[in-house]
Image (tube, rainbow, N blue to C red):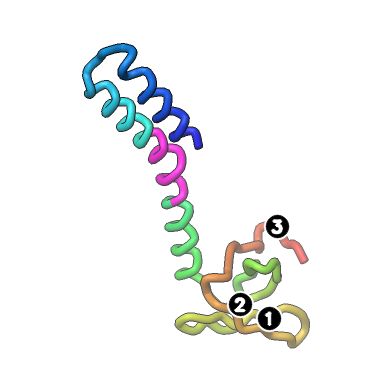
Amino acid sequence: MMMITLLQAAASQAPAQGGSPWSMWIMLALVFVVMWLFMIRPQRKQQKELEKFRSELKKGDKVVTAGGIFGTVAEIQDRSILIKVDGETKLRVDKNSILRDYSDNQQA
């Protein structure tokens, strides 16, 4: 939304100024650089950290799923994980649904 507004402002000012077309390209490049720095780069970093966390999971880790289920890892397979949720209740979930480790918080 902000990018569209900036582009419209740049397009409306270019003919009035009579400046070179390079100023518009510089403005576009700056907008893309700012978007990359504040949106794309942090998201990629977070995604890499999550992938690393999932690849380093081991039996006994306490995890939270995307659905908000707290459990302890009982078995790890290639694409799925068996988590022990309460007593002897176990759930098999997709590995990509594991979001975070909660052993630091000691919740649930």
User: Given contact means CB atoms under 8 Å apart, are the residues at marks 2 and 1 in contact?
Assistant: yes
Task: Give x and y (percent) for residue 36.
Answer: 38, 40
Identity, as a three-letter code, of the amino acid under mark 3: Asn
Q: Going by the image, does 53 lie left or right of 33?
A: right
The residue located at (76%, 80%) in the rendering is 86
Identity, as a three-letter code, of the amino acid under mark 1: Lys
User: What separation in Å lies between label 3 and label 1 (alpha carbons)?
Assistant: 18 Å
- Pointer 2 residue: 73
The residue located at (68%, 74%) in the rendering is 71
Identify which residue, 65 or 71, lies in the foreground.
65
Q: Quadrant of residue 32?
A: top left
Label 2 vs 1, first from the N-terminus: 2
Q: Nearest to the eye among marks 3 and 1: give it.
A: 1
- Pointer 3 residue: 105
- Pointer 1 residue: 84
Callout 3 environment at 10 Å: few (<14), some (14 to 19), or many (20+)?
A: few
